[in-house]
Image: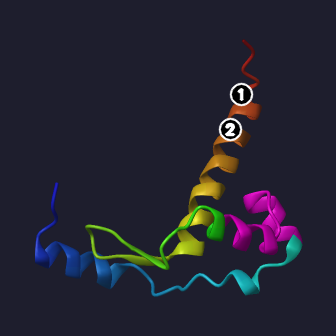
Amino acid sequence: MQMRDHEQEILRGKVPDIRFNINRLSVKDCINRFRFRKVHLAYLLMQFRLPPFFSTEEGYRVSGIEALCITLEEKVSFEGILSELDIRT
């Protein structure tokens, strides 16, 4: 579903302009959030051959490292939910 131009402008006006900076994160934060150290994240970025930037249909643009971190953080978050539910097979 495509957003109309005026809807995109409204959304952009409500979303804060916050930039992701991997260098601001401590080693402990990286491991807790992504399960990797910064150097390993850079290695994954190169090995997966991710592009420098990703653009979404909604007009957002994120760096390759940010996209990788979003994906890894979602995985860690999902694993935490599963462990809280204590699902056993």
Q: Residue at x 15, y 61 (%)?
A: 2
Q: Which residue is found at the position 84% from the left and 78% from the top? A: 26
Give amino acid for label 2: Ile
Residue 20 against residue 37 in the figure, above or below: below
- Using the image, determine if residue 52 lies above or below residue 43: below
Residue depicted at x 69% and y 32%: 82
**Relative image position of residue 45 (x, y in whole percent):** 63, 69
Whether 12 is drawn above or below 4: the answer is below
The reply to whether callout 1 and callout 2 are in contact (CB within 8 Å) is yes
Magenta residues (range): 28-44
Q: How is the image coloured?
A: rainbow
**Residue, disc 2:** 81
Dot label at residue 85: 1
Q: Tell me where residue 57 appears, x and y as whole percent.
A: 26, 67
The residue most toward the right is 28
Where is residue 34? Give x, y as percent.
Answer: 73, 60
**Rendered image: mark on residue 6:** none
Does residue 30 appear to the left or right of 42 in the view shown?
right
In which quadrant of the rendered view does residue 73 lie? bottom right
Left or right of residue 32, residue 21 in this image: left
* Mark 1 vs mark 2, CA separation in Å: 6 Å
Q: Which quadrant of the rendered structure holds the N terminus?
A: bottom left
Q: Is residue 36 left or right of residue 8?
A: right
40 vs 56, nearest the viewer? 40
Question: The disc labelled 1 sits on which kind of residue?
Answer: Leu
Observer-nearest of 70 and 38: 38
